[in-house]
Image (tube, rainbow, N blue to C red):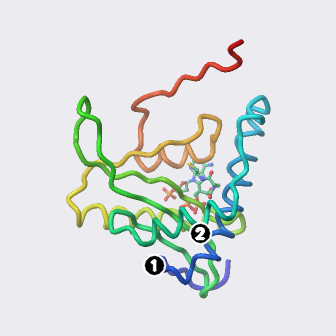
């Protein structure tokens, strides 16, 4: 990989580039999961660019959300979205950090770009007094699960799903 990687807070001007990255994220995550478990194909909905743009705009404007973009010599190659969430009364702590999206373009993977984005997100959480971080990952996304385990994430709860009720 040539070039210099920069990680920075995303701005509204980045919106079209973030939406394009999100389309790739959708394709790659879907592919990783379907390779493991083709039976779930009918549950995987394709993302829609208009919905994605509206959601991203809201996130960029929110002071409760950190949208990070990774660039290789000013060319976008990854992004991450994280926010502060609130637990229902039965769980502690009340406020925790949630990593909603993390994506790096295929040709840039394995160069620690996602590690750099997560570092930025952790610093943003820390400034807000957040010490606990949560994320969800599709069970069949073996690659992402292995990376999260390496970063120190462990299983906390399991979502169990029964389909095809008549
Ligand atoms: C998951 C993803 C974001 C990782 O991005 P990346 O920039 O390639 O990750 P990094 O290079 O920062 O690697 C992170 C760590 O995982 C390690 N790692 C990489 N591949 C691994 C694998 N297959 N198994 C275990 N660990 C692995 C790296 O060595 C690194 O560890 P280190 O810092 O101790 O060396 C990227 O693969 C991606 O965008 N995938 C498609 C979208 C997706 O599925 N996102 C997750 C949805 S929840």
Q: Please name the residue that numbered disc 2 is placed on.
A: 78
Secondary element under disc 2, as helix, strand or loop, is strand
Q: Residue 46 shows which numbered tag?
A: none
Q: Residue at x 51, y 63 (%)?
A: 80
Disc 1 under 8 Å from ligand 1? The reply is: no
Q: Is residue 134 above or below residue 88?
A: below
Front position in the image: 16 or 118:
16
Q: Quick one: label 2, few (<14), some, or many (20+) residues within 10 Å?
A: many
Label 1 vs label 2: CA separation?
11 Å
Number of marks: 2
Q: Quadrant of ligand 1?
A: bottom right
User: Which quadrant of the figure has residue 84?
Assistant: bottom left
In the image, is 136 to the left or to the right of 85? right
Disc 2 under 8 Å from ligand 1? The reply is: yes
In the image, is 37 to the left or to the right of 149? right
Q: Residue at x 71, y 44 (%)?
A: 45
Secondary element under disc 1, as helix, strand or loop, is strand
Quarter of the image that includes the N terminus: bottom right
Q: Please name the residue that numbered disc 1 is placed on.
A: 8
User: Which quadrant of the figure has residue 156?
Assistant: top left
Q: Residue at x 55, y 43 (%)?
A: 146
Residue 165 at x, y percent in the picture: 68, 14
Q: Residue at x 33, y 68 (%)?
A: 63
Q: Quick one: label 1, few (<14), some, or many (20+) residues within 10 Å?
A: some
């Amino acid at each position: 990989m040539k070039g210099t990687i920069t990680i920075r807070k995303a701005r509204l001007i980045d919106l079209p580039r973030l939406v394009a990255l999100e389309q790739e994220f959708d394709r790659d995550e879907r592919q990783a999961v379907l390779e493991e478990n083709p039976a779930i194909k009918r549950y995987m909905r394709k993302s829609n660019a208009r919905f994605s743009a509206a959601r991203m705009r809201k996130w960029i404007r929110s002071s409760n959300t950190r949208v990070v973009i990774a660039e290789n010599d000013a060319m976008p190659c990854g992004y991450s979205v994280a926010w502060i969430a609130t637990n229902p009364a039965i769980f502690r702590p009340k406020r925790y950090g949630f990593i909603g999206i993390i994506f790096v373009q295929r040709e840039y993977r394995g160069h620690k770009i996602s590690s750099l984005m997560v570092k930025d997100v952790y610093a943003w959480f820390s400034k807000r007094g957040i010490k606990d971080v949560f994320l969800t990952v599709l069970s069949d996304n073996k690659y992402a699960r292995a990376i999260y385990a390496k970063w120190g994430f462990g299983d906390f709860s399991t979502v169990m799903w029964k389909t095809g009720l008549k």
